[in-house]
Image: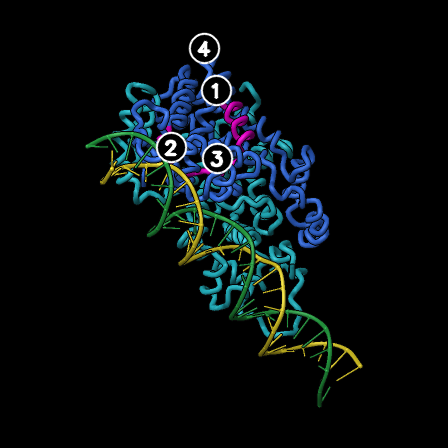
Chain colours: A blue, B cyan, C green, D yellow
DNA sequence: TCAGAACCTTGTACGGCGTACAACGTAAGA
DNA sequence: TCTTACGTTGTACGCCGTACAAGGTTCTGA
């Protein structure tokens, strides 16, 4: 293991160990590998980010990628932290907590819309990256106006971000979206036969929810509904159980 | 494609097409394949569910698996629907909506704790399976006492289940848990150096949240906090914006 | 009765993946 | 100048999902 992941995460920090001076100059850097991987993931999804394709994209052999990144797992952590580091973290100013939370939620939703592959990266080691830590600190400060102790503050932020993550997942285009019309054409009749007269509530609600969108559910409405719920519930948590 | 996924999903329904009578009797059934795959996933995770290992577990050649299941993607859908079908769906009786929602949440959390691999299956086609539809119908009925129209009812259920899913994800043991102590031993010093005096809030809250558990965050507290928030917010949604 | 159709099973093979390893070239330090 | 550290590269291994064709087995219909 040439360099530890934590040092690669903090590679732009002054205290980060630099590579020794001897030997040929690197033709690419860790940052370039991460950038290329992110671009590839944006364009074709995370599954397209293979070490071989990365080498091609960088004009370098497959195995050369491993000089700058310890392996694919580590690369995903670096990609996620880099994406977080790119997020705008505007000062919260004098905004109330509702506006702050809304902004945090909107920004995170936008992030996931731009980089849907973030939803597939679940490595806990991301938490040690500079982008992730800066984001965490900033978003915790969004809750400054609320009277929450430290543990509750963390739980509240988790609550908000988990909601956003789930909403982003629902809004993400299904990779099978192209085929769905044909699949549905083949399935609709059979499903009706199987269902008969059962599950009337599920069928009514399912079709009502799907009516707003083309999808079987309505992510747009779920976002509005959920956002209102999140804000409502934080208000209750702040003002006390009965207020 | 021998049999459509929808027919495999509904394979126990009387109207489902049965295999023709000619040829040798199948040594295994679709259900047996799904069960073996689920057992394997429970024991070793979804990544261990490979067609080759499934064939071994069933005492059948690798390619024979494809007689009973169209491919790995379809198999995952069948596994997920089968897991939902196994869920207990007790009548809601006279319980109030809070108790109903709590029970739905608890049951779903238990499901995800028993089958963590469910979190990795995101195929929308699962929605057409009998187990999934029955579960959806049952859980919609949990919200009967609340004055919600169809679209809001769907959104409310999504809100609850998404929270549970996120909580389950947080509670899921990191596959890297064994190595974390050693990793942390190597990283702690370097991270302290990188952080310096920055991000004080993040560090304080992060360590406070982690103090309750061994993990860097406290999923147990997040569950309690989030559950209270979910119930609070549904109460507000039900009673009107100001009540 | 007995071919032929329908079906299940199987082995081989292909193109992908991540990555271990060793050989080689290159540039800076002694 | 020689050595040492480092970047680059090709080959190779063991996985993966699965297409395909050959073969065996059982029921159907003439």
Q: Residues within 10 Å of mark 3 (few under 14, many from 20)?
A: many
Residue A88 has which mark? 1
Residue positioned most to the top? A94
Residue designated by label 3: B163
Question: Sequence order check: which comes first, mark 4 or mark 1?
Answer: 1
Residue at mark 2 to residue at mark 4: CA–CA distance: 45 Å
Q: Are marks 4 and 3 in contact (CB under 8 Å)?
A: no
Can you say which quadrant of the picture contains the N terminus of chain A? top left
Residue designated by label 2: A25
Chain letter of the residue carrying label 1:
A
Chain letter of the residue carrying label 2:
A
Question: Closer to the camera: disc 2 or disc 4?
Answer: 2
Q: Are marks 2 and 1 in contact (CB under 8 Å)?
A: no
Question: Closer to the camera: disc 1 or disc 3?
Answer: 1
Asked if residue A33 is among those painted magenta in the image, a careful observer would answer no
Residue at mark 1 to residue at mark 3: CA–CA distance: 26 Å
Residue drawn at x 51%, y 64% as measured from the top left: B62
Chain letter of the residue carrying label 4:
A
Residue drawn at x 41%, y 14% as measured from the top left: A145
Question: Sequence order check: which comes first, mark 2 or mark 4?
Answer: 2
**Residue A103, percent from left and from top:** 51, 19
Q: What range is drawn magenta here?
A: A104-129
């Amino acid at each position: 293991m040439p360099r530890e992941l934590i040092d690669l995460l903090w590679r732009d920090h002054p205290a980060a160990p630099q590579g020794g001076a001897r030997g040929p100059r690197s033709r690419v850097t860790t940052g370039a590998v991460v950038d290329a991987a992110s671009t590839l993931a944006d364009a074709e999804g995370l599954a397209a980010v293979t070490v071989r394709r990365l080498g091609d994209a960088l004009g370098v052999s497959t195995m050369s990628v491993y000089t700058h990144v310890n392996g694919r797992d580590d690369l995903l952590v670096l990609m996620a932290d880099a994406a977080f580091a790119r997020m705008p973290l505007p000062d919260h100013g004098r905004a109330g907590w509702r506006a702050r939370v809304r902004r945090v939620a909107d920004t995170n939703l936008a992030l996931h819309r731009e980089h849907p592959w973030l939803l597939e990266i679940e490595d806990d080691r991301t938490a040690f990256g500079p982008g992730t830590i800066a984001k965490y600190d900033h978003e915790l400060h969004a809750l400054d106006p609320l009277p929450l102790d430290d543990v509750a503050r963390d739980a509240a932020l988790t609550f908000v971000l988990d909601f956003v993550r789930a909403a982003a997942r629902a809004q993400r285009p299904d990779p099978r979206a192209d085929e769905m019309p044909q699949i549905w054409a083949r399935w609709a009749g059979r499903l009706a036969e199987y269902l008969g007269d059962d599950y009337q509530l599920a069928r009514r609600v399912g079709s009502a929810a799907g009516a707003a969108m083309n999808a079987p559910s309505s992510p747009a409405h779920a976002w509005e509904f959920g956002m209102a719920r999140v804000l409502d519930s934080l208000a209750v948590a702040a003002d006390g159980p009965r207020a």
